[in-house]
Image (cartoon, rainbow, N blue to C red):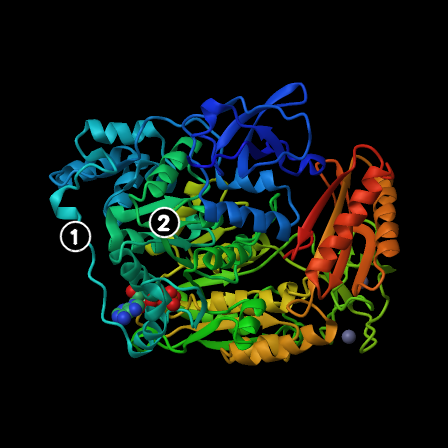
Amino acid sequence: MEHRAAYAQVVVEIADRKVDRPFHYYIPPELKEAVQPGVRVLVPFGHRQLEGYVIGLADQADVSEVKPILAVVEGELSIQPELLRLARWMAVYYMCPLVTVLQAFFPRGKRTKQKELWCYLEPSATVEQLGLAKKRAPKQGAIIDILQQFGSLPVGQVLKLADADRRSLMSLVDKGVVVIREAEAAAPAQEEVPEKPPRLTAAQARVMEEIRPKLVPPQYEVFLLHGVTGSGKTEIYLQSLAQAVEAGYQGIVLFPEISLTTHLVERFYRRFGRQVAVLHSGLSVGERLATLDRISSGQVPVVVGTRSAVFAPAPKLGLIILDEEHETSYRQEAVPKYHAREVAIARAFIHKIPVILGSATPSLESYHRARQGKYKLLVMEERVEQKHLPQVLVTDMRSELKEGNASVFGKLLQEKLQERLESKEQAILFLNRRGYANLFHCRDCGQVIKCARCDVSLTYYAKQHCLKCHYCGYVRPVPAACPVCGSSRVRPLGAGTEKVEQELRRLFPEAKVVRLDSDTVGRKGDYYRLWEMFQRREADVMIGTQMVAKGLDFPGVTLVGVILADQMLNFPDFRARERTFQLLTQVAGRAGRGSRPGEVVIQTYVPEDPTIQAVVRHNYREFFAQEVHLRQLLNYPPFSHILRILVLGPDEEMCETGSKEIADQINYYRGAVDVTLFGPAPAPVTKINNVYRWQLLLKGLDLKKMRHLVGASLREVATKGRLPRGLRINLDVDPLGML
Ligand code: ADP
Ligand code: ZN
Ligand code: ZN
């Protein structure tokens, strides 16, 4: 007879560090069959009944009085063994309760019996019918536009893109313009002709030669595909996927923000048609669960999605692809605080499959590992079809000021804008205004006032009229003169997108302008509407924050202006230079994607800055060499790990007391562990929603030891009751931002 374990290890659904461990439960005979690792069960816990996950089986229990499992929760997907392993790895690595990871894998919610519904335009719908619907109702028009572009799409996806409700869609169905079918239903004959892949360029072919041997049968390997914007990386993703899919495997493709890269998703739909499932935050729980079911049954081979799609329960997973691997939106800022890139690599390791990380501006971490030989570096240096990278010009804003031009537009940018308006070409203006982060700088030499201890810029607090360091808590009065050149013209630095728009309208009253930032793009549909306006060339200039930097492909754009690079460059974070290089390169990549060559104008008070110079020369390797040197000198990642302890509480004093207790304990325990402790200090954003925030930062080489040190210290202060009641502790391993 087959051996059956007597006990199950169950993680219950309470996100509390104190119960963050598996509990043993007795498996009643009638449930022996059903209780397996990965299933959801109902168990007694204290005086309550809670749901939880079985994470393992055992012959022995760790306590004498063991309670029974009450039931197996019906209709839930069970977690695959590989995902269970991944969950355990994440809980350890990111120091978060295992149950929060398991919850992230499987969203809770009611499964509707409904299958995923797709819609497409009725092939026999006439031009008149379409035109009439468009004219009468703009929302219906938006739905038609999108279906014309994409062919067929899931209902949820169409509504999201069109920012329309079901009523508008149903009214189109009533008119016989749109058809809705279950995803599985037979495709209408004419529209399911998948696009033929283009012939690979020489560079692409070389890259495919490297990837191919690892695809079928899949083998573990991390590829870092470093290709300039427009070099044809997406084509590499498509063809690698096609090979995996053809051999019967499933693939996951991750994008930073799906709404910002709709044209990318479109390319996957075009190539793979209905074999694509899309996962993003805009789906309802029902839609998400239905999609997950289709993935876990193996029906859909291609999963495209944002960061949490890295957990997609694909039983035949053969490949993971991460586009724009340097993007910060791969980091989840809520618990479990994970980075989808690191999770993807861990998952690939567990499944023994390849992963492709792609970027024009790889993260320092990834490139460093590639150079160490841990990842395989693949390079594509040129744009497809001999299109040239844009020429990058720099305006010195110090001389503009000296010559009496106090406008946010330097002379060169004004001239270039004028030219574009006359020749009916389009321009994008970029400004990364992050409101609270005002810097203080010298208007004569460009010097930004920095913290003596941390080599990050100090932040100007207008109300208190002082400068503060976001890392170590150092505070100083505003200097009367520049520490470098002695000039008394030291001022806060900053102007927002709104001001840029105002000034643009004053200088060029005839220009049609759209502004894309979080103030103008309240809802998802707004983005698509403004994007479309610009695409159709109904506007001449687009002004925006980061949103305009990413993945947009407008052939009409021949000019990109960066209003002021300094704010980004001096953002109080050791990654500021890296972010600046990435963002500027990305924005610059928006110019000259059509038939005409592009130009970029970067305005700055520090034109000689090495980061900006590397952007001018389109030279990632030059940037990497400088930056990796600095990181090594200052012992920042990738040469160390950072672990942040965030202390949250209802009042400031409580946070201070609590964080000092923790700091004392860490100092008491640290012994020979080679770590540096910064703080305790108020977090850069000291209060959110009336919750006060203090922080401690640990920097060190050995993350394992750091985790043990922090874990032991927190347990000690908690069990000895040394933390004020009502305090919450939040851990952040390898944080990206530290606000
Ligand atoms: P990236 O992802 O590196 O920015 P893309 O894959 O989007 O680059 O390619 C840039 C442009 O070149 C796209 O319009 C794409 O359709 C086109 N393209 C890519 N590869 C080829 C190819 N082998 N032949 C012709 N056109 C290609
Ligand atoms: Zn100065
Ligand atoms: Zn400091």
* C-alpha gap between disc 2 and disc 1: 20 Å
Tag of residue 193:
1
**Does residue 526 sit above or below 571 in this rendering?**
above
**Residue 702, position as x, y percentages in the image:** 71, 64
View extreme (top): residue: 47
- The image quadrant where one finds ligand 2 is bottom right
Residue drawn at x 53%, y 41% as measured from the top left: 104
Position of 685 with respect to 319 (left or right) is: right
Q: Residues within 10 Å of mark 2 (few under 14, many from 20)?
A: many
Query: Relative to residue 132, is residue 685 drawn left or right?
Result: right
Q: Quadrant of residue 133?
A: top left
Q: Nearer the viewer, mark 2 or mark 1?
A: 2
Q: Which residue is mark 2?
A: 303
Front-most of 604 and 541? Answer: 604
Q: Quadrant of residue 369?
A: bottom right
In the rendering, at what x and y percent does residue 661 appear? Answer: 87, 46
Q: Residue 433, how many percent across, how many down?
A: 61, 56
Residue at the location (44% across, 32% down)?
285
Task: Pick the residue in front: 705 or 104.
Answer: 705
Some atom of ligand 1 lies within 8 Å of the CB belonging to the residue at label 2: no
Which three-letter amino acid code belongs to the residue tagged 2? Val
Hey, what amino acid is under mark 1? Val
Left/right placement of residue 120 relative to residue 99 reads: left
For label 1, the SS is: loop
Say above or below: 136 vs 737.
Answer: above
Q: Quadrant of the N terminus?
A: top left
Residue 75 vertical position relative to residue 253 in the rendered view, above or below: above
Q: Of marks 2 and 1, which one's residue comes earlier in the chain?
A: 1
Residues 36 and 454: in front is: 36
Residue 655 seen anywhere in this rendered image of the structure? no
Viewer-nearest residue: 122 or 448: 122
Q: Label 1: how many residues lie within 10 Å, few (<14), some (14-19) or many (20+)?
A: few
